[in-house]
Amino acid sequence: MQCDFFLGATSLILDGDASILSLQQVCINGEEISGDTKMQVEQDKLTIHNVTEPAEIRITTRFNAKENTELAGLYKSGDNFCTQCEAEGFRRITYFPDRPDVMSTYTTTIHADREKFPVMLSNGNLVSKQKVSSKDSSMHSATWHDPWPKPSYLFALVAGNLTATRDTFCTQSGKNVDLVIWTDPHNAHLTAHAMYSLQRAMKWDEDRFGLEYDLDLFNIVAVDDFNMGAMENKSLNVFNSRLVLASPDTATDLSYEQIESVVGHEYFHNWTGNRITCRDWFQLSLKEGLTVFRDQEFTMDLHSRPVARINDVRNLRSRQFAEDKSGMSHPVRPISYEKIDNFYTATIYEKGAEVIRMYYTLLGKEKFRKAIDLYFERHDGQACTTDDFFAVMSEVSSVPLDGFERWYTQAGTPVLKASSEYLKDTQQLRLSLQQVLPTPPEAHPVEHMGPQFIPVSTGLLDDNGNDLPLTSYSYQEDSGQTITTTVDQGTTTAVLPFKAFSGEFLINNVPQKPAAVSLLRDFSAPVVLHYNQTAEELQHLAKHDSNPFNRYESTQKLARLAISASYYQESNHATTFNEALATTHGNALEREDNSKTVTKLDPAAVAQMLSLPSIEELGPLLIQDITDSPKDPLLDPLLLNGVRTQAIQTTAEAIENDLLQTFNATTEALHQLEYEPHGVQTGLRSLKGQIINRLVALDEHKHANRAHAMFETATNMTERMMALTALSHSTSNYRTDALDQFYQRWRTEQLNVIAWLGVQARSEVVNNVSKVRALLSHESFDMRTPNKVYALIGGFSTSPANFHAADGSGYEFLADSVLAVDQINPQVSARLLGPFTTANNYQPLYRDGMVQQLLRLERASLSGNASEIVGKALR
Ligand code: ARG
Ligand code: ZN
């Protein structure tokens, strides 16, 4: 490769991992060097002395890719070779300045057995292909050249017996790009959806951001063994096969959606990540937060914006808010790490995307685009920081962004406390706001923490549920000066720029007392909102709010209040909120008179309104005081799970007939339609799935047969899995029958087998741990395949009843599994440890059980990846 990296010192220090590499030869300008005075090899580096001028350095290494079970560097997946170099995999291939700010151009020549490896790929363009390699007559060779300078983490190489699915894309300037998706030959028929997703992504990036692809070829390779989702290597994306392959019988609606979004995500990295990369790994969110924001917008523009927003917020709350309450809590721009691979987190990705979304909310669509244009104009070809990005946004924003930068540096989820009062005399609504920041982990002293800039999207509803028009709002600054801001005419949502620890906004010209205040519309900031609202106000909002997100949020809030009241045994409140919740669920199911539609509202949105907040979402909220009155800072997960299930049952009981009616209506409507993974039918299926779960949870004796019938008549994987999931939590014979049938029918399809392992692992049936242990030795399970490990072991940890079993068997199972996986793949074992990092949130019975296992792990000699997480879980 052509690399201008030069330290100016007399020694060249190159990264390399001696646990896998064996160094064969080093030549400088054609001459071999050896001996301690010339060079030194250590565990993690190679130092070459006396390199004072630009030189050609040739380094030869050997390693065994077959035994590379960590799946970092160059490794074998099935019969094929592939690479994963982000973050620090390139140093497992050769010695190199393996850091993102060293950008080089690469020319790659591959020599391989002609029969076994007919396909040989690397980044950029194919320069030449030789039928007979210069090395050996049974080999052939190929040379690739990538003209774009890039950091080593974007290098890729693939060799194997792969089949191509080909198509093209014509760019906005009229250039034809060849698109190829490479798979194992028997999977080539499963690539159509990924190909179409890629074409849509390329078009969308042109339309929405003016960004055009910059080479003549774009490859995607699907591999079965992959630690994460996918990787944006320049022009040679490597994907976990579950995010490429799809057919109605192997993929659910959700998988189709994920494929589209991840294909988009990796493609979008070509500009946000590859053309402009990161100066160092502390800046990881510069590319990941921004690219997640872009893939979220892609989904929103292609499908339903509110439905997508709700999914994104659910995901943020259950994963990132939980992370903020764990030993792994860290800022969007971390201040330290032991293993960078442990920092591909919900905070870097999802909270990072929320930070970008706040810029977007504050600048508005047009100015945001202007700022992004400026970002590319100024920084194309550079390795940048989040400060560079902030500077560009600040320059273009008409709202001063002071305090915004703290979103990058301060860890944790802020609590936004709000109260409101109608001032009749002056016809104003007073909104008092306060932000409370979490106590940060050591390294970052509290006294340095300042208020974060929180955009608060606000609207007011009248008694009929209509939005009140807004004209202006006033804010009293610390200096005592009052500033009045006019809002655009016709606007019914104002974005209040709240940047102090506490302050008051006065919304002017409000002629009557609003029936309800709609705060934080579209979830305009990643905060926990504390705002006292009555059950009536919440019902009013759930029914009428013009902001679909807040309609959803109001039902969620009713559910949170109902669950928290039961949890704390406040039976009066519990009854009130449970009743209100059942009523809103009933309302959501309402169908239009004389109409063929199943529900008045978008069925996908109804499904979301019916779903209760997950345990992961509720946990942090309960201990951070859901109702503004902290009761017990330590969580009882079994009690929480129990009251949540109760809430599901109570509300289902109250509207059982509505549920049954809608269940039948969705069945009938779906029966008329041929399966497609998009459009209104996906909403119908998600509603149907939601309902069957509720019904079986309500009374399995009465409803398990319905789920079984749904399973047997299903014509697609989505409904099959929904029925199987509902049955998986029951103890009825239907459960075993359906599981057996499923395995017999689909055991040759890897993705189905993985889903089958997962659904059994997540079961809430008590003592499921022994079943899951038994599955470890099932013919279909393989500890070396990350997808299977995540499904079975990772899946098990999400079952509250079994993971938190009072006898500690769930914790023991996780620790045993981590010990076994860690020998094979440290990145995977470290990820499995996630559920232990919240140990300190739980009551002693649970916490001590987890700590006991963590101490056991600490005594074992774990990998660096796993021990970093164990250490953080214990602190
Ligand atoms: N950059 C990839 C993506 O988000 C993630 C790769 C992370 N891999 C790793 N081993 N840490 O698209
Ligand atoms: Zn990414």
Image (cartoon, grey):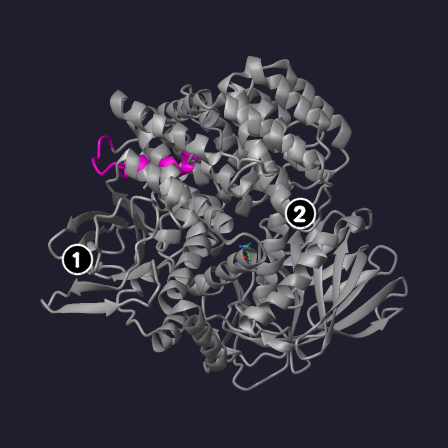
Start-end of magenta stretch? 614-632
- The x and y percentages for residue 80 are 75, 53
82, above or below 540, in the image: below
Mark 1 against mark 2, which lies toward the viewer? 1
The residue at the point 33 percent across, 67 percent down is 489
Q: Label 2 amino acid? A: Asp
SS category of the residue bearing label 2:
loop
Between 184 and 400, which is closer to the camera in this rendering? Answer: 400
| Residue, disc 2 | 225
Marks 1 and 2, how far apart at CA = 52 Å
- The x and y percentages for residue 431 are 20, 53
Between 640 and 552, which is closer to the camera in this rendering? Answer: 552
Ligand 1 image-quadrant field: bottom right
Count up the numbered dots: 2
Tell me which corner region of the image, top left, top right, bottom left or bottom right, holds residue 63: bottom right
Tell me which corner region of the image, top left, top right, bottom left or bottom right, holds residue 356: bottom left
- The x and y percentages for residue 88 are 54, 60
The residue at the point 51 percent across, 73 percent down is 276
220, above or below 688, in the image: below
The residue at the point 44 percent across, 58 percent down is 353
| Residue, disc 1 | 503
Mark 1 Cα-neighbour bin, 10 Å: few <14, some 14–19, many ≥20: some
Quadrant into which the C terminus falls: top left
Q: Is mark 1 within 8 Å of ligand 2?
A: no
Q: Label 1 amino acid? A: Gly
Which numbered disc flags the more N-terminal residue, 1 or 2?
A: 2
